[in-house]
Amino acid sequence: MWGVALLLAMILLANPLLADGAWAATAYVTNERDNSLSVVDLDQMKTVRTVPVGQRPRGIAITADGREILICASDDDTIQIVDTATLKVVGTLPSGPDPETFALHAAANRLFVSNENDSKVTVIDVAKRRVLAEIPTGVEPEGLAVSPDGKTIVNTSEVTNMAHFFEVASHRMIASVLVDPRPRIAAFRHDGGEVWVSSELGGRVSVIDPVTHAVTHRIGFDVQGLRAETIQPVGIRFTRNDATAFIALGPANRVAVVDTKTYQVSKYLLVGQRVWQLAFTPDEKYLLTTNGLSNDISVIDVPALKVVRSIPVGRLPWGVVVAP
Amino acid sequence: MKRPKPAARNGIGRRLVITGLAVAALPVRPARAEAIIRVGYIRWAERRPTISLLDRPAPDDGLAGARLGLADNNTTGAFLGQSFELADVPVRQNDDLPGVLARLAADGTRLVLTDLPAEGVLQLADAAPGHAVTLFNIAAPDDALRGENCRAEVIHVAPARSMLADALAQYLVWKKWSRWVLAVGSHAEDARLAEAYRRAARRFGARIVKEITYEDTGGSRQTDSGVVQTQQQMPVFTQGLPEYDVLVAADENEVFAGYLPYRTWDARPVAGSAGLRPVSWDPGSESWGGTQLQDRFVRMFHRPMTGLDMQAWTAVRMIGEAASRGGADPAALPRTLRAPEFGVAAYKGQKLTLRDWDGQLRQPILLSDGRGVVSISPQPGFLHQVTELDTLGVDRPESRCRFK
């Protein structure tokens, strides 16, 4: 009995997230320059743990059950698996060289990884931890997105300036769509009707019809008092009902709120410096932003469209996920 | 926010067996006919000695950048049915440059990079219209090529001396190191560079408190005269100066500037041709995805990427970008390049665009200490009504360029 209590006490001490006895909403942030993962408790609105991970951690994903986090340790040429209960690296996946970011195809249990230096996308069987295929793509592949029906993935290439569409079943490239310079992130609407691709140096978001592979709209941004060249869209997130899109504008230090019907920006939210990636909490009450230069994340109250908090994390925060 | 029970686990933890899918896909090549875009590279094979052995140019300095740009273009081109070829033509003093251009043109090459001094660029520019060739000046920094001697057939990818001088001046003024001593070499290029520094000082509020000249008498290099000699010469060269903040050296032929740091009479920083140098690229630059380019370059060529490599890479990428946006037709391609909306991404944090009044590529300038990037100009606070990049170099109203 005493032993059990001691064990329980040790668990509580080891994991402050458990200390209040409730499962808190937890966010995980990769810190590219610190080789670490920040664990942020969203009830306390603070960083509660900083965990060492591999070198140059960038892309991050969490499994649907919230038990494991995948991290691109770019300079270690691997993807690390972190157990969210122990916050320890429990395994690696053979990612190919310099993995920057990836998309997890949950249904097929496959991971699509962009190998930035090699102009290819590596397909990994997550369960078997082995490479299924290496697909040639454009120069400096970056963003990856899986279509909601699981049949298509989209990969952006930063130097080639295209969004490449691949068929998941065959790994075949089915289309390449030219977009504005330095495309970063591709995001499907939840209904699968559109893919939005942000072009960092083009300063616009291209809206692509995933059936005809045509660019149907281009969304521009205009922030009063800012030069056009400082507006560099990167991260894109849609609300679950697809009514609103949030777009991170990099060194403009703003997140644009876009009406997906009219493609008009309704509001610019001032966040931390050089904002790149975004993640919703599961209840969509909050949207988190990683701010690379101010070393923090901003917390946006989604219904109120207000920035309510900034939370310090490690240096050069890159990506963020929230436990489901 | 409750965690699901272990029974509901899926994703990573589940040992899902996938069969029949472990087939590596082959690259998809479009079936359509390939358009071939030929790029020429006229390469100055004359090399001058450098002060540091570390600065000795590699045999493929510049050319390697073009080759990487070509590889990048060809990866992109594979999706568009375009392929790019590079013809490397080394030339020496007294070679027949117009003849070289004629031969390239006869092979169907309409886009030519010139890694040449200004006189060579001018010779080719005068021959270019006859062959419908567009030149990309990747090496000559001369303002005259963008001013009184400008030609419509030339696109200047290399930054002009005035841009380099302005970039350094903005930083020195921001640093409040505004009292300069200008140390000028005795070659014609040094005089032109010194003029760029005088102009920069006037524009941005620095003051040249004294100019000193270093005569190139030949034989003054460390190998000839030894470390002891240099140690004596440089303090003497810089003694008796009025109060100053920074010594700005204009020495394009590497005669003396490299010997100045740590050897000046007064303890002052050195900038310009040594010390803090304005450059188009530094192999330590990692901003804006620069690490990726550095990695690709080192993996291909096993050496750091120089400014000349970057200028060549940028020129080839401009050609690739124009071909992917506006088609491979060599007659249409220069028009695409010059269109106001055209821009190329070159790891400088913003699109690089062309100045329509003189054909110069707008670009931020890095300030390098030889180990990494100290700062990047334009500096904050130097404002411009169109783009801050136009605070570097000769702006539209001042330009002496009149295309015929």
Image (tube, coloured by chain):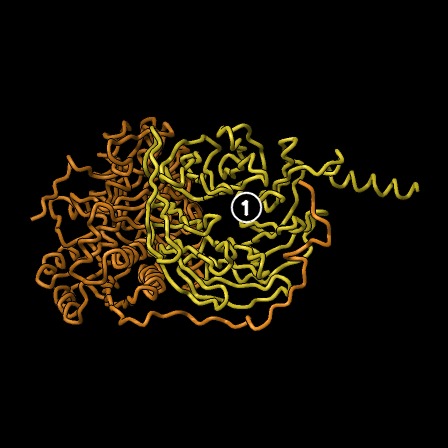
Residue drawn at 52 percent across, 68 percent down: A133
Find residue B396 and report its image quarter: top left
Find residue A255 and report its image quarter: top left
Find residue B259 and report its image quarter: top left
Is A38 on the left or on the right of B329, as rendered? right
Q: Can residue B88 be seen by looking at this rendering?
A: yes
Q: Residue furthest left?
A: B404
Total marks in image: 1
Q: For the residue carrying disc 1, how many other residues have a C-alpha within 10 Å: few (<14), some (14-19), or many (20+)?
A: many
User: Which residue position is annotated with label 1?
Assistant: A32
Q: Residue furthest right?
A: A1
Residue drawn at 37 percent across, 45 percent down: A205
Tell me the element at label 1. Answer: loop
Host chain of mark 1:
A
Whether B216 is drawn above or below B199: the answer is below
Q: What x and y, as percent, mark residue B297?
A: 41, 59
**Which residue type carries mark 1?**
Glu
Residue drawn at 40 percent across, 60 percent down: A138
Q: Which chain is yellow?
A: A
Q: Nearer the viewer, residue B217 or B318?
A: B318
Q: Nearer the viewer, residue B275 or A164?
A: A164
Q: What x and y, as percent, mark residue A155?
A: 44, 57
Q: Which chain is orange?
A: B
The quadrant of the rendering that contains the N terminus of chain B is top right
Q: Nearer the viewer, residue A16 or B11?
A: B11
Q: What x and y, as percent, mark residue A175?
A: 37, 62
Residue drawn at 54 percent across, 45 percent down: A319
Q: Can residue B55 be seen by looking at this rendering?
A: no
Q: What x and y, as percent, mark residue B150?
A: 13, 48
